[in-house]
């Protein structure tokens, strides 16, 4: 298996600090004293949220140092450069309402392109390989009523988009909507979902389980996606995050891969972006903040922006400590995982069975998407596993995950046997500084936590997609960084 690392580029005018490597080297530091470096604001995390916070602060004349634990900028917008072309492991598409992301791309001359059309996806359910055309009348289709005409991968959108009870997306935190902060399973059952529909929908939803994920949080995301879009009669819109132009939505991608955008943002900064600098502690005393990294480096500032997931922030020693409901939210909030296995087909094996390159399955490998180039040729096959299923795969050694996916695909789709090569395995929980793919609200948490997720804690301001209100994906991250920067500007002024 060939492992392809994300490209490393020089991203500041003064260069990046050299990494001191793994924790095993830390004892060599002893009690060496490091001199303080100072800036008006320290930003933790060089993803879209952190970089946008830094850009907004610098634009108003404030000095900023960005600390990033990984060896690249972009956070969860990571692009691998494969022989078949640049491929995103996260942050795939720029949605129709990503105004900030589109503006950033324009400002920094990062070209956007129209992505290739969605590639057809067949189904493997209950031991049988079935084309999408044959699914409604297939014997293994145990769904009932109108569900039978809906592809398995579209059931979540079918139940959560039709007659969305939110009057508008801004209302999701209002008391009148608290009754929707129940499990997705309960919500779907109340809408008439069959037991089989629940089972099949659990594959596509990136939550820990339908019995725990918050329906209200999902309804918010779908309401935002649907805003301003004419209602479609298409029952087979794939999912909240899989909808595309075929469903009436306008999407774009970054030419050369999404990571090109945060790289351009980082290059535009006047201050440094320090790679390989995981933060150990944030101590707020009086009017000053001291930030320490694991290699012993020390930084002073007036304010700090944490633009990392709570899965990372809760492992940073913050003093004074978070308190009350906010402490509970930081310590206990759920963060889902996604495992991607990138493969290259040697031949168009799908022509030898159902004719559809992609595959939804009720097996441990869940979904396999096909990627096409501008000419419409299939150049990649990507296994995509969400939620608890991804964490289960993480129990295997990385090399074994690729073998497991290829073997499973061969078992459920014999035409693929010997005709697929693994290029890269990527787990957001195992192979990233973020330790997760996305934040997930559990049922009941919206009404308890929504008001404190973005609340400043002393001189520490919180950004990142987990602090979002109504925006989705990359736009949510960019907006959160902008918000945190404005909060600090107001306090300084």
Image (tube, helix red, strand yellow):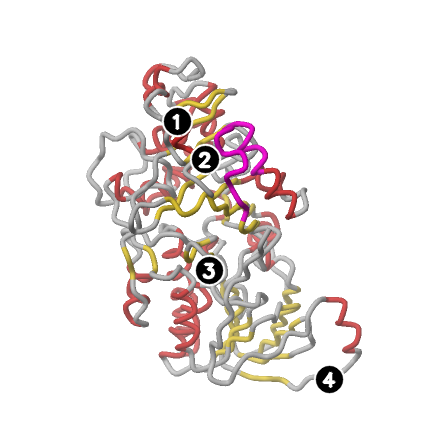
Residue receiving disc 1: 354
Quarter holding residue 234 = top left
Tell whether label 2 touches label 4 (CB within 8 Å). no
Asked whether residue 376 is in view, the answer is yes
Which is nearer the N-term, disc 4 or disc 2? 4
Q: Real-space Cα distance between discs 3 and 1?
A: 30 Å
Query: Could you tell me which residue is drawn at 65 percent across and 78 percent down?
Result: 297
Q: Secondary structure at mark 4?
A: loop
Give the main secondary structure of the magenta stretch.
Answer: helix
Which is nearer the N-term, disc 1 or disc 4? 4
Residue receiving disc 4: 33
Left or right, 393 with respect to 30, comes to left
Q: Residue 486: where, in percent of width, then height?
A: 38, 70
Q: Residues within 10 Å of mark 4 (few under 14, many from 20)?
A: few
Quarter holding residue 394 = top right
- The label shown at residue 81 is 3
Q: Real-space Cα distance between discs 1 and 4?
A: 66 Å
């Amino acid at each position: 298996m060939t492992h392809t690392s994300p490209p490393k580029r020089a991203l500041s005018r003064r260069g990046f600090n050299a990494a001191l490597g793994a924790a095993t080297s830390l004892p060599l530091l002893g009690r060496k004293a490091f001199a303080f470096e100072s800036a008006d604001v320290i930003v933790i995390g060089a993803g879209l949220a952190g970089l946008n916070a830094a850009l907004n602060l610098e634009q108003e004349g404030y000095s900023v140092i960005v600390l990033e634990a990984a060896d690249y900028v972009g956070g969860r917008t990571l692009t691998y450069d494969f022989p078949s072309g640049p491929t995103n492991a996260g942050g795939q598409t720029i949605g129709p309402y990503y105004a900030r992301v589109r503006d950033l791309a324009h400002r920094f001359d990062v070209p956007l392109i129209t992505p290739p059309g969605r590639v057809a996806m067949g189904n493997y359910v209950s031991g049988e390989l079935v084309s999408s055309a044959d699914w409604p009348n297939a014997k293994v289709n145990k769904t009932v009523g109108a569900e039978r005409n809906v592809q398995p991968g579209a059931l979540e959108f079918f139940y959560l988009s039709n007659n969305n009870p939110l009057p508008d997306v801004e209302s999701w935190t209002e008391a009148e909507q608290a009754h929707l902060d129940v499990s997705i399973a309960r919500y779907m059952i109340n809408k008439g979902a069959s037991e089989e529909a629940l089972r099949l929908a659990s594959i596509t939803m990136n939550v820990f389980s339908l019995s725990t994920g918050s329906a209200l949080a999902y309804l918010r995301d779908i309401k935002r996606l649907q805003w301003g879009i004419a209602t479609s009669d298409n029952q087979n819109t794939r999912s909240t995050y899989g909808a595309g132009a075929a469903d009436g939505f306008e999407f774009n991608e970054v030419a050369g891969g999404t990571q090109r955008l945060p790289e351009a943002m980082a290059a535009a900064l006047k201050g440094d972006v320090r790679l390989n600098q995981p933060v150990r502690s944030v101590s707020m005393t009086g009017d000053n903040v001291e930030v320490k990294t694991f290699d012993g480096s020390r930084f002073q500032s007036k304010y700090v922006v944490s633009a990392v997931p709570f899965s990372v922030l809760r492992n940073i020693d913050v003093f004074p400590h978070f308190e009350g409901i906010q402490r509970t939210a930081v310590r206990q909030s759920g963060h889902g995982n996604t495992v991607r296995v990138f493969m290259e087909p040697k031949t168009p094996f799908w022509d030898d069975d159902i004719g559809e390159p992609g595959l939804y399955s009720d097996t441990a490998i869940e979904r396999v998407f096909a990627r096409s180039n501008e000419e419409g040729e299939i150049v990649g096959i990507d296994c995509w596993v969400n939620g608890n299923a991804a964490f289960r795969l993480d129990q295997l050694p990385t090399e074994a995950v690729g073998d497991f996916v290829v073997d499973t695909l061969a078992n459920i789709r014999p035409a693929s046997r010997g005709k697929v090569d693994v290029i890269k395995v990527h787990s957001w929980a195992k192979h990233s500084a973020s330790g997760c793919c996305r934040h997930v609200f559990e049922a009941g948490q919206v009404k308890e936590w929504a008001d404190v997720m973005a609340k400043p804690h002393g001189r520490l301001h919180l950004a990142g997609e987990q602090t979002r209100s109504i925006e989705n994906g990359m736009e949510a991250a960019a907006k959160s960084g902008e918000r945190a920067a404005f909060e600090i500007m107001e306090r300084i002024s």
